[in-house]
Image (cartoon, rainbow, N blue to C red):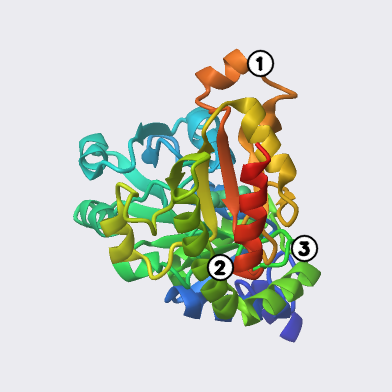
Amino acid sequence: EAFADMASTPRHPRYYTRYGNPVHERVIKIMSELEGTETALVTGSGMGAIATTLLSLVRAGDHVIAQNRHYMSTAKIMDEMLPRFGVEVTVVEQADTAAFEEAIRPNTKLIMVETPANPTLVVTDLEAVVKLAKSRGILVVCDNTFASPINQRPHDYGVDVVVHSATKYLGGHHDLTAGVICTSNELAEQIWQTHLSLGSVLSPMDAWLLLRGLRTLPMRMKQINANALALAEFLENQPQVEKVFYPGLPSHPQHELAKRQMKGFGAVIAFSIKGGYEETRRFVSSLKISRHAVSLGGVDSLVVHTAAMWAGTMTEEQMRTSGIQPNFVRFSTGIEHIEDLKADVKQALQSI
Ligand code: PLP
């Protein structure tokens, strides 16, 4: 009887790990409290969370509105996967709330937002998008990876599903991949049914590492927010830097909106170097503290010279047409001492 009960109870933590797990349960409790939702689900990666959510909530004949800037693999789901299954997708400029409204159709089922978003940290107005959606019964899903629940709580504005790549801030130590889906009990059960078939399972060991990361999330975010803001201000005043994109700077075109919906602005600073590919390559290569790696939101500062990353697979012409600027740098600020970070950036700028 006890076994039959386990087998038939949704998300039972002790039946089989794809269905649920005691360590998952502990992460779920913390994440639902952090995001202010009834419950949460965990997955093996951020893309596991996003793909499982989208594939559970839409069906052939539905229409989805997405942003013109999403994490690359999310954009691929929108551009290629959903249309293959008969779901139409309209992509809109996310800084323009009116564009979301214009894109709404009678069969619009879901709006996907992600804020702030790569590469230039454009912000989406969560309150305005939710207002448009709620009056029409449209679900809103928000990728909150770049903000973290410490800096932004989309559910407070009425967002139905908040997804994370927990690989980033939530894990925080560059040593796990995980995803989280924070939502209502009703939607969680629907998404969990799809999760059982898609099988993006979070390994209990990674869930345990994630728990370890969550214990220090507020302290890490405090240090990361302060470091990144100070570094962004510092970069803006360096003669070798052309432009800095950071929502915490008054020069960011959506600074007022960012201040309204965020408590801190996160680790990622995007900036361009005066000069071209070679000057930027020299700058990035001269950094001593920051490692060259693509992730973000961990304890170590990481840096990416986007054009160099694609140099092996794309010609300069292809990069230009894809909008990859040769002098663009993405910096994810860690928890190091700010004076060390500034000194390192300064010496690297001077070596250009
Ligand atoms: N969403 C955002 C905003 C991301 O930056 C990433 C990864 O970089 C993902 C989703 C995907 O997460 P994961 O790599 O954990 O699958």
Percent across and percent down for residue 3 are 75, 80
Marks 3 and 2 sit apart, C-alpha to C-alpha, by 18 Å
Closer-to-camera residue (198/147): 147
Mark 3 → mark 1, Cα distance in angstroms:
33 Å
Query: Left or right: where does residue 268 sit relative to residue 100?
Result: right
Q: Is residue 250 left or right of residue 24?
A: left
Name the outermost residue toward the top: 317
Q: Which residue is mark 1?
A: 315
Question: What's the amino acid at mark 2?
Answer: Ile
Left or right, 112 with reference to 209: left
Check disc 2 and report its element: helix, strand or loop. helix
Q: Is residue 172 above or below residue 257?
A: below
Location of the N terminus (image quadrant): bottom right
Q: Which mark sits nearer the N-terminus, 1 or 2?
A: 2
Q: Secondary structure at mark 1?
A: loop
Count neighbours of disc 2 (C-alpha within 10 A) and say few if under 14, some if 14 to 19, many if 20 or more: many
Q: Which residue is mark 3?
A: 175
Q: Amino acid at mark 1?
A: Thr
Coordinates of residue 235 in the picture (x, y in percent): 50, 51
Query: Where does residue 201 sit, x and y in percent of width and height?
Result: 72, 60
Query: Is there any visible trace of residue 16 in the rendered image?
Result: no
Residue 224 marker? 2
3 or 2: mark nearer the eye: 2
Judging depth in this view, the residue of 61 and 167 nearest the camera is 167
Q: Residues within 10 Å of mark 3 (few under 14, many from 20)?
A: few
Query: Contact (CB < 8 A) between labels 3 and 2?
Result: no
Tell me the mark number nearer the camera, choosing from 3 and 1.
Answer: 1
First in sequence, mark 3 or 2: give its number. 3
